[in-house]
Amino acid sequence: MSKKGLTYLFFFVVLLGGFYAALVIFTDFEKVKLPVLNTVQPFTFLRQDSAVVSQKDLKKRIYVAEYFFTTCKGICPKMNKNMQVVYEKYKGNPNFLILSHTVNPENDSVPVLKRYADSLGASPNNWWFLYGSKTDLYKTARESYLLDDPKNSSKNIDEQFLHTQFFALVDGQGRVRGIYDGIKKDEVDQLMIDIEELMNE
């Protein structure tokens, strides 16, 4: 190669190196992280084993929240079948939980939730089925997890029935970082990818 050719090659290598260095220095890596959508507000519910639990019990734990009811024949079985995939991947991990809230506390008492949890092979170590007042359950869905329009909280609670197929992903600081369609396999797959990202934050 001629001296001129070597000069061009050297210039190209230096230019490429400079471009890479600038990319590393100036790229805002925060942009590729999951956004913060909301912060979970304080709550207290009963778990399927009758234990009283609150958001304080979730400190530093990543979790997925959903809403369902035990007699549902439509979307709920599909949602919880997909949720079982998530559960099987992370069961035994002390830093991960699933929170399944009933939307029908009039029917889904704690013993009913316990039977339902047992039918799915769900242990309270990693999968909680939660009971509380309808007002508190719906308020948490809307104002914390963004799984329904918060404006609906102003309506007569007795005339409402929340039926959502979406899952909320919450980080160890109690912040909502993603919303996913629980009946779509590709979105549940993305949920698990994002769980891994939070685990590595």
Image (cartoon, helix red, strand yellow):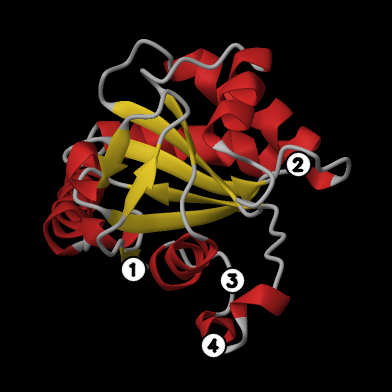
Where's residue 88, x and y in %? Answer: 54, 14
User: In the drawing, what numbered circle is on residue 148?
Assistant: 3
Disc with the residue nearer the chain's start (4 vs 2): 2
Tag 1 and tag 2, C-beta contact below 8 Å: no
Is the N terminus in the top left, top right, bottom left or bottom right quadrant? Answer: top left
Q: Which residue is mark 4?
A: 151
10 Å neighbourhood of mark 2: few (<14), some, or many (≥20)? many
* Near-viewer residue (24 or 154): 154
Q: Is residue 58 above or below residue 196?
A: below
Residue labelled with disc 2: 76
In this view, which residue lies farthest toward the right? 73
Comes first in the chain, label 3 or label 1: 1
Residue at the location (15% across, 55% down)?
18
**In the rendered image, is residue 3 in sight?**
no
Q: Could you give the CA–CA distance between mark 3 and mark 1, rounded to whole angstroms? A: 13 Å
Please state if 128 lies on the left or on the right of 186 as rendered: left
Amino acid type at image mark 1: Asn
The secondary element bearing badge 1 is classed as strand
Residue type at mark 2 is: Cys
> Residue 134: which quarter of the image?
bottom right
SS under mark 3 = loop
Q: Locate the C terminus by quadrant.
A: top left
Name the amino acid type tagged 3.
Asp
Judge the density around disc 1: few (<14), some (14-19), many (≥20) Cα neighbours within 10 Å.
some
Give how far apart the Cα atoms at labels 2 and 3 are: 16 Å
